[in-house]
Amino acid sequence: MGFAAVLGALVYLARESRFCMFYTNNPTIIAAMPLLVWVWWFHVADAAQTLANFVLRSHRVTLIPLVIYVASLWGVGLLGGYWVTTSAWAPAELQGAQGYWAMSTAGLIVAGVALCGFLAWVHRQEAPRPQSFPN
């Protein structure tokens, strides 16, 4: 996760320098540079949820992560993004692509926190309990 945070920060902080010119010189794409702040958070949250999910798979725990993914990625990310970008109450900054990126990032953050929390619970359940010996 630390490596993902460093790479995300590098991409975001170098977004207006020549760094973006390595990828494209299309002015439409360059105009989308404010979206890179969401990519930074998205990248860190994605690293957290991916690591937690793979460790849970190694414990042969798959059903609860599936439920977490459905609720967070589809519920918060996809449906939340649609709701934010089409509702009148949302601020102007969240209209269009910003809203979808914000809600997709929020969905990944929810998934990452939930999966890491669930993984901690699984580890506590599997920890050896101290034996009590009769006197």
Image: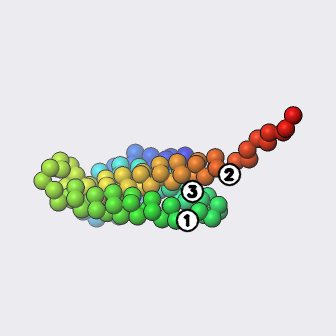
Asked if residue 106 shows in the view, the reply is: yes
What residue would you read off at disc 1?
A: 62
Q: Are marks 2 and 3 in contact (CB under 8 Å)?
A: no
Residue 19: % across, % down:
41, 54
On screen, residue 29 versus residue 18, left or right, reads left
Residue for point 68% across, 51% down: 126
State the residue lying farthest toward the front: 135
What residue would you read off at disc 3?
A: 51
Kind of residue sitting beneath label 3: Leu
What residue would you read off at disc 2?
A: 126
Of marks 2 and 3, the one in the foreground: 2
- What colouring does the structure picture have? rainbow
Q: Quadrant of residue 100?
A: bottom left
Residue 80: % across, % down:
28, 58
- Give the mark nearest the N terminus, 1 or 3: 3
Residue for point 59% across, 59% down: 56
**Nearest the camera: 88 or 20?**
88
Question: Does residue 14 lie above or below 83 as drawn?
Answer: above
Query: SS class of the residue under badge 2?
Result: helix
Total labels drawn: 3
Kind of residue sitting beneath label 2: Glu
Query: SS class of the residue under badge 3?
Result: helix
Of marks 2 and 1, the one in the foreground: 2
**Nearest the camera: 61 or 82?**
61
- Give the mark nearest the N terminus, 2 or 1: 1
Which quarter of the image is occupied by the C terminus?
Answer: top right
Residue 8: % across, % down:
45, 50
